[in-house]
Amino acid sequence: IRTVRPITPQLIPLAICLLLVPFLILLSGLSGVYVWRSVAVGWEVPLYLQYGDGLPPYAEVSLPTLSAVQPYDFTLRLDVPAIESNFHLGNFMSTLTLSTTSNKTIVTTRRPSMILPPTSSWIPFVSSKRRTVAIEVQFLKSYVTGHSHVVARVEIGRQDSWRSLGSGEGRELSVLSASVSGTVRHKGIRGLISRYPFMFGNIAAATFLLCSLAVLAACLLP
């Protein structure tokens, strides 16, 4: 006991370090993972349009969890058959309504579109007539929702169903597939972090570990 007592003041800090350092390393790793997982990323959600409800074709979908402070570009992507009935429709409207889960409207925007026949190939004897036409409609550019959980409603067509044209029969746009996507806008520090999430996750883990070790050393040193 007499031989151990003189070195006891040195053994206690060493024991504390051996116990706390692995715990601090674990917390640092978790902090890095948290930063990496919390970074805003782009997304794309398929839309299943509803027809025959007396309204233009529409779809409602819950979007993936968003960053409430991150700007996104909201875009509608349509894949429509290259048929004459679609080409004859002329201009039509696409509407996006974003709302909260409690049905409070965040924003509504409308954009006009038109389907044009695909161009023929300029190479002789080569038929490149496409059977589908891809359309992209940008609803919102660099928009911040202010909410993490958002519901999107998309309508495609005209409110009058084209009855004001021709002989007055109702018409609808034929759609093979549709989706709405959100692209992260890389602006400022948040944009830099979202561009390089793995690197900033490691930086966050290293910073947390160094700060924790500095505080531990300050508490243990005489």
Image (cartoon, helix red, strand yellow):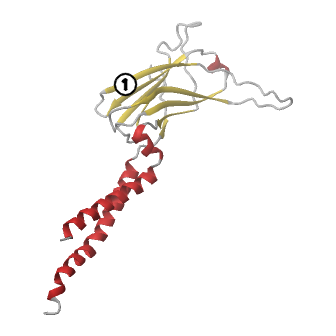
Q: Using the rendered view, name the quadrant where residue 219 is placed.
A: bottom left
Q: Using the rendered view, name the quadrant where residue 107 is placed.
A: top left
Q: Residue at x 37, y 48 (%)?
A: 38
**172 left or right of 123 in image:** left
| Residue farthest bottom in this picture | 2
**134 left or right of 154 in image:** right
160 relative to 201, above or below: above
Q: Position of residue 72 (x, y in %)?
A: 44, 34
- Quadrant the C terminus occupies: bottom left
Q: Residue at x 39, y 37 (%)?
A: 70
Q: Using the rendered view, name the quadrant where residue 32 is placed.
A: bottom left
Nearest the viewer among 221 and 32 is 221
**96 left or right of 167 in image:** left
How packed mark 1 is, by other alpha carbons closer than 10 Å (few <14, some 14-19, many 20 or more), is: few
Q: Residue at x 40, y 55 (%)?
A: 203
Q: Position of residue 132 (x, y in %)?
A: 66, 30
Nearest the viewer among 34 and 102 is 34
What is the secondary structure assignment of the residue under circle 1? strand
| Residue farthest front in this picture | 222
Q: Is residue 58 visible?
A: no
Q: Residue at x 35, y 36 (%)?
A: 69
Q: Position of residue 140 (x, y in %)?
A: 45, 27
* Amino acid identity at mark 1: Val
**58 left or right of 146 in image:** right
Q: Which residue is mark 1?
A: 107
- Quadrant the N terminus occupies: bottom left
Q: Position of residue 169 (x, y in %)?
A: 55, 11
